[in-house]
Amino acid sequence: MNNNLFNEMISGFVEAKKYRAGKKAKMRVSRVTFEPVSMKPAEIRLVRTRLRFSPREFAEFLCTRVGTLRSWEQGSRKPQSSALRLSAIAKEKPALLLERRALITKLSSS
């Protein structure tokens, strides 16, 4: 790795650490808000089946356990934060996920 790039990265981490500790830091902070998303259990299952993901594959994509995904699909629990957002993206733009899935399959078979 280029020494200058490495030093810039370390400097950025140091500034982020200062900011996190509540100290004055040389950085710009941007906050992004997203519209709240909600999905019914049937919608979550529909997204998974349209993508032709097994429960295990979809749970891995959402970084959760199969049991958790099952409870979302049955309605006993509701997904939160990133898993919910990823499910909504999968619903709106399934081609992105299918492209990623093909790439992962290709890389793992090499």
Image (cartoon, rainbow, N blue to C red):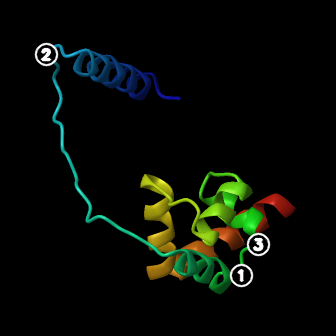
Residue on which the image places disc 2: 24
Of callouts 1 and 2, the N-terminal one: 2
Q: Residue at x 26, y 65 (%)?
A: 35
- Disc 1 or disc 2, which is closer to the eye? 1
Q: Is residue 19 above or below residue 65?
A: above
Using the image, tell me which numbered label, if any, was put on residue 52.
Answer: 1
Image point 19% across, 16% down: which residue? 22
Query: How many marks on residues?
Result: 3
Is the residue under label 2 in contact with that under label 3 (CB below 8 Å)?
Answer: no
Q: Give the mark nearer the N terminus: 3 vs 2.
A: 2
Quarter of the image where one finds residue 104? bottom right
Residue 90, relative to residue 33: is it above or below?
A: below
Front-lying residue, 52 or 7: 52
- Report the residue marked by disc 3: 54
Percent x, y for residue 97?
58, 73
Give the mark toward the camera: 3 or 2: 3
Question: Could you tell me how far apart the alpha carbons at marks 3 and 2 are, in whole angstroms?
Answer: 48 Å
